[in-house]
Image (cartoon, rainbow, N blue to C red):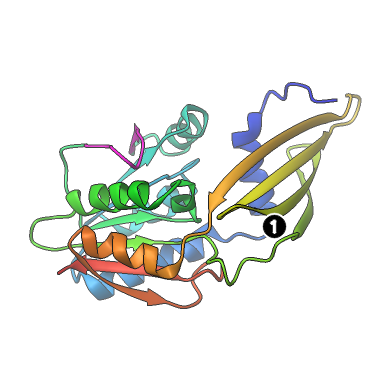
Amino acid sequence: MTTAYAGGIARLYDLVHQGKGKDYAREAADLAALIGSRVPGAHSVLDVACGTGLHLEHLAPLFASVEGVEISPDMRELAVRRNPDVTVHLGDMRDFALGTTHSAVTCMFSSIGHMRDQAELDAALARFAAHLDPAGGVVVVEPWWFPETFTPGYVGASITEAEGRTISRVSHSRLEDDATRIDVHYLIASPGEEITHLAESHRITLFERAAYERAFVRAGLEVEFLEGGPSGRGLFVGVPA
């Protein structure tokens, strides 16, 4: 039975990924070092699809200015609550226009995979490039899996204990045309309460590496691909051509 959960999916997202060992502080430090290597003296970062603001929290002490963009009102609300001194804009990566520019624009944790096709990917990269400082900057994008590195049928499972609750998460990934379909189920158990069940489903496009590179080039950026990255999917790094 699926029921309401006061914390919502956004809060579960935080607890589960932290419980699985995602180290936002280390990722932010590595990201800052990468930005600094491409833009010495970088002073500001715009994190697009910033989610609940965990990267922002750890980037804020490393730069003079950080801002976020998030399409989900629930996630943005948590990001604002977590980072009261940081501006977090409600916006879509395909068409946001803030009227500001930054030393770096980042898009992490494979959020870019929610673009549905090459046209949307191009639109997002064009928006990222448009928000770079005229004197130069860097765009860093963490992709989703490529078609040849995706594992159809993959099942992920974890159990997290936090805030007096036990949270079980099970996900199943399958191939759906040119995308990954991920079905995720949560069971949340608290002493003296009924078990809560939540479910969500995501379609994440399996772009070829060349598709990302085309989007960077069309946005006027020279692009390189770095193996590894925070989740093993690599990072695309672009600077103005």
Q: What is the crowding at mark 1: few (fewer than 14 residues within 10 Å), some, or many (at least 20)? A: few
Residue 202 percent location from the top left of the image: 61, 42
Whether 113 is drawn above or below 8: the answer is: below
Q: Amino acid at mark 1?
A: Lys
Magenta stretch contains residue 17:
no
224 with respect to 180 (left or right): left
The residue nearer to you, when weighing 143 against 177, is 177
Residue picked out by circle 1: 20
158 with respect to 107 (left or right): right
- Tell me the element at label 1: loop
Q: Which residues are magenta?
A: 87-97
> Residue reaching furthest front?
177
Which of the 4 quarters of the picture holds residue 183?
top right
Q: Quadrant of the N terminus?
A: top right
| Residue 32 can be seen, yes or no | no
Residue 100 percent location from the top left of the image: 16, 42
| Residue 60 can be seen, yes or no | yes
Residue 63 percent location from the top left of the image: 28, 56
Q: Residue at x 29, y 47 (%)?
A: 123
Q: Quadrant of the C terminus?
A: bottom left
Which of the 4 quarters of the picture holds residue 76?
top left
Q: Residue at x 55, y 64 (%)?
A: 145
183 with respect to 187 (left or right): left
- Magenta: main secondary structure: loop
Numbered label tally:
1
Q: Residue at x 59, y 52 (%)?
A: 177
> Residue reaching furthest bottom?
227
Residue 164 percent location from the top left of the image: 79, 37
